Image: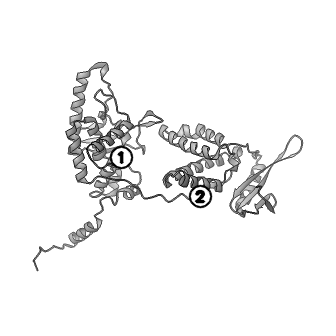
Amino acid sequence: MAVKWKKIEKNIYQSIENPRKYKVVLYFGRDERNKLISSSKVIEGNLADARKLLKLHEADQVKQMAQKPVKVTIQELVDNWNTTIGDVQNVETTQTSTRNLQRHMLDYFGNIRVDKLNTSLIRKYMVYLRKEKGLSAKTVNKHRTHFHTLFDYMISEEEVYGVYKNPVDAIKPYPVEEFDHEIYSPEEAKELLIALRASGRYALEIAVNLAFWCGCRREETCALEWPDVDMENREIKICQVRTTAKGTIVERKSTKNKEIRTVGIPAWLYDCLQLVKERQQEMKALLQGEYFTERDFVFCHDNGKPWNPNSLSNQYKDFLKKNGFKHIRYHDLRHTNLSMLMTRMSAVDVAKIGGHKQVSTTTDIYGHSFDDSVERGAETMDEIMGVVLKKEGER
């Protein structure tokens, strides 16, 4: 059904059915036959937004910068953005996740022209992802953010795309559900570590210990090398990652937050590192030469080759199942570590150990995992005020 318009003022029309939809007629001079070249831009907003769009266009005309926009499809936009921005500024893993978002966008919108995209259509797309596809609010917000990025890109090149306003500005992100993760209690964690030590599975044991004692992410565990392990000073430098993207191993000389962090080596982990180091030296001497891979990874197979990160997750999961342990993700071992630290250390220090740029991230996720703040608050006040509790039966 065609949209019916009523003229509001020169070059500006308002939809009869939707008062918040405006059509602005833009002129770009005359062609070789002296015929006026015009184009219309439909926006959602108010009359002030329509007037602003028209004034910006007229200002470009005065500067002789106004050019008739090319009718670009969403596929062409995505290709242009990937070529000039995404593939240049983003690392491989980010490129992979971004292309996954774009695939969903293209599947839904087809090869629609970008000048046809508006707030209403993008909002309907987000509802589709949430209700029809069953995606989490956090994931749907990632789609919203990428659309916002694409429109900002078009605005920066308005002479090509003819975009003056970002329609995503009018769409609020979905409220994100409370972060959901499971952790082990200190007793459960101790039982797991004892079972791993008894199993003789050296590689898996060191991987679990690095996550539990140091809060290492999976990609950090898989990338840790012996030169970054200072046994004398009992410190580990976490400075690189090893992960997968599209089934391909990606090694990067930086962490998730592009910061190097140093963590201490607790006694249990120290013993574990010594056992693993001795085991690797024995296997190196046994296999020798071409049968042993010299990469110096802490977490590796007996032949020195590093594990596939996905294989770590699978074997960890299998170990829990076969030995009757409550299943929590490998990444939740990191959550367990930082949650325990929050009961004895400040959020600032825990954020530093965990590699969080924002302390609020630490408090939001781990602040209530082992929450005995009410009891500790009372005990602290008693201690400050010098209150001495009497034994039962005393007056």
- Disc on res. 125: none
- The amino acid beneath tag 1 is His
Query: For the residue marked with disc 2, what is the amino acid?
Result: Ile
Left or right relative to 266: residue 367: right
In this rendering, does residue 123 appear at all?
yes
Q: Which residue is mark 1?
A: 331
Its colouring scheme is one colour
User: What SS does tag 2 mark?
Assistant: loop
Provide residue 325's location: percent of width, then percent of height: 27, 48
Left or right side of 292 for 242? right
* Mark 2 surroundings: few (<14), some (14-19) or many (≥20) residues within 10 A: some
Q: Are marks 2 and 1 in contact (CB under 8 Å)?
A: no
Q: Nearer the viewer, residue 142 or 253?
A: 142
Where the N terminus falls, by quadrant?
bottom right
Q: Nearer the viewer, residue 340 or 27?
A: 340
Instruction: Answer with the quarter of the image where residue 168 lies.
Output: bottom right
Q: Name the mark on residue 171.
A: 2
Classify residue 261 by image quadrant: top left
How many residues crowd around disc 1 within 10 Å: few (fewer than 14), some, or many (20 or more)?
some
Residue 233 in view: no
The C terminus - image quarter: bottom left
Q: Is residue 284 above or below residue 340?
A: above
Please state if 195 lies on the left or on the right of 294 as rendered.
Answer: left
Horizontal arrangement in the rendering, residue 126 relative to residue 263 (left or right): right
- Expressed as whole percent of the image width and height from the top left, the position of residue 175 reads 50, 60
Please identify the residue farthest to the right as the structure is shown: 33
Position of 76 relative to 126 (above/below)? above
- Residue drawn at 70 percent across, 50 percent down: 116
Image location of residue 344, percent across then percent down: 26, 57
Looking at the rendered structure, the secondary structure element under dot 1 is helix
| Residue 74 percent across, percent down from the top left | 65, 43
As drawn, the residue found furthest toward the bottom would be 395
